[in-house]
Image (cartoon, rainbow, N blue to C red):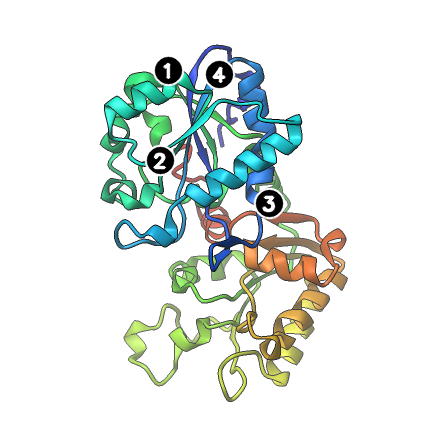
């Protein structure tokens, strides 16, 4: 893989489009975890110190249209609070722009401010279509693109493939995550175990390819419901002969691992030399459905192999149990690490 150009190499005096990971967990309008914003503060400070203006872009959730509940305005305000606390006051001229296509608004905002924060990119169809004309207006006034959103580096979204059209740098955390995953690919210490959970069916899209990389794949969370053996066999993403795939039977209510699932999973995990875990093992939001996730978390933490946790929810469960110091690497996204393990490259720099 080619060496990524770190943001540390950026020059002064640019207008920078900064793609951040703004997909924060929010409930009833309250931000539950702002760690993804905190992670990007060093980059923002570096860009400002070098007299660059910053246009922050990113997405939140999966809106079908412009949904007020998925506006980035609260995240913009949260970022400002963090910045102000860090520099001891209202240190940066800033503005929130509700339409990055509006040339009059963009031109004025860039001329008068140091930080310009754009509305949810997924309010625009072009973003998920990979249509970079979405940024035509911004590109008139911006000369450099910085990607600090590794969690979505596997997507062909317009904001992820801008590197194909602009001078590009990558965030400090972004570069670090790529280096860490490359270590897994280089070492290939076996047996390698991949633990898949959560509720996103797209984790299963490359199951056959993953089964050729890993010695075992353990599947829990909501995912076993997508692999119902009573369903049409032609729809199954893997062949029954692939015996290294272990699908949980789940509790009777389907909301957590059964005791037998936990026993089987732990036996395999205990022997692992490399473990990648992406997704909770049950409906973790319900305190009565946490046993599977917590038992697997402890088993992984106590395993002597190289341990990787992927995705915000999975990382949160580890932190809640006080096991963070037992994990070798926390990756910001589950889907992105699985794609990287399979392909060895991602759309964010291809």
Which of disc 4 and disc 1 is earlier in sequence?
Answer: 4
Image quadrant where residue 140 sits: top left
Q: Secondary structure at mark 3?
A: helix
Going 76% across and 63% down the picture, which residue do you hit? 302
Which of disc 1 and disc 2 is earlier in sequence?
Answer: 1
Give the foreground label among 1 and 4. 1
Q: Nearer the viewer, residue 59 or 186?
A: 59
Q: Are marks 3 and 2 in contact (CB under 8 Å)?
A: no
Residue 111 numbered tag: 1
Image quadrant where residue 237 sits: bottom left
Q: Position of residue 311 (x, y in %)?
A: 54, 54
**Residue 144 falls left or right of residue 9:** left
How many numbered marks are there? 4
**Residue pointed to by mark 3:** 35
Which of disc 3 and disc 1 is earlier in sequence?
Answer: 3
**Residue pointed to by mark 2:** 159
Q: Is residue 170 visible?
A: yes
Crowd tier of the residue under label 4, counting other residues whose Cα lies within 10 Å: few below 14, some 14–19, many 20 or above: many
Q: Secondary structure at mark 2?
A: loop
**Residue pointed to by mark 4:** 52
Query: Could you give the CA–CA distance between mark 1 and mark 4, rounded to whole angstroms?
Result: 12 Å
Query: Could you give the CA–CA distance between mark 1 and mark 3, rounded to whole angstroms?
Result: 30 Å
Crowd tier of the residue under label 2, counting other residues whose Cα lies within 10 Å: few below 14, some 14–19, many 20 or above: many
Q: Nearer the viewer, residue 229 or 40?
A: 40
Is 121 rendered above or below residue 281? Answer: above
Query: Could you give the CA–CA distance between mark 4 and mark 3, rounded to whole angstroms?
Result: 24 Å
Going 55% across and 47% down the picture, which residue do you hit? 332
Give the foreground label among 1 and 3. 1
Give the foreground label among 4 and 2. 4
């Amino acid at each position: 893989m080619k060496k990524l150009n770190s943001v540390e190499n950026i020059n002064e005096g640019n207008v920078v489009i900064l793609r951040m990971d703004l997909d924060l967990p929010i409930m009833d309008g309250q931000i539950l975890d702002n760690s993804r914003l905190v992670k990007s503060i060093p980059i923002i400070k570096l860009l400002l110190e070098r007299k660059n203006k910053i246009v922050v872009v990113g997405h939140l959730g999966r809106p079908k249209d412009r949904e007020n509940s998925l506006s980035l305005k609260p995240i913009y305000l949260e970022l400002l609070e963090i910045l102000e606390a860090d520099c001891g006051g209202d240190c940066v001229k800033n503005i929130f722009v509700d339409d990055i296509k509006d040339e009059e608004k963009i031109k004025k905002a860039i001329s008068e401010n140091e930080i310009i924060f754009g509305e949810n990119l997924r309010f625009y169809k072009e973003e998920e279509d990979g249509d970079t004309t979405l940024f035509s207006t911004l590109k008139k006034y911006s000369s450099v693109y910085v990607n600090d959103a590794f969690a979505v580096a596997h997507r062909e979204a317009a904001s992820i493939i801008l590197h194909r059209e602009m001078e590009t740098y990558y965030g400090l955390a972004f570069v670090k995550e790529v280096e860490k995953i490359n270590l897994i690919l280089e070492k290939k210490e076996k047996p390698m175990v991949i633990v898949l959970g959560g509720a996103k069916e797209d984790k299963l899209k490359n199951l056959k390819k993953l089964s050729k990389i890993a010695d075992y794949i353990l599947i829990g969370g909501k995912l076993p419901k997508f692999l119902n053996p009573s369903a049409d066999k032609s729809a199954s993403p893997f062949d029954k002969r692939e015996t290294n795939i272990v699908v949980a039977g789940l509790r009777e209510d389907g909301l957590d691992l059964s005791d037998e699932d936990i026993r089987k999973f732990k036996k395999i995990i205990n022997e692992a030399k490399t473990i990648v875990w992406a997704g909770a093992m049950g409906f973790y939001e319900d305190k009565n459905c946490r046993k599977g996730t917590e038992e697997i978390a402890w088993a992984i933490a106590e395993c002597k192999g190289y341990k990787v946790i992927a995705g915000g929810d999975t990382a949160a469960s580890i932190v809640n149990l006080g096991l963070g110091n037992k994990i070798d690497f926390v990756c910001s996204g589950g889907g992105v690490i699985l794609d990287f393990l399979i392909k060895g490259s991602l759309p964010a720099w291809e």
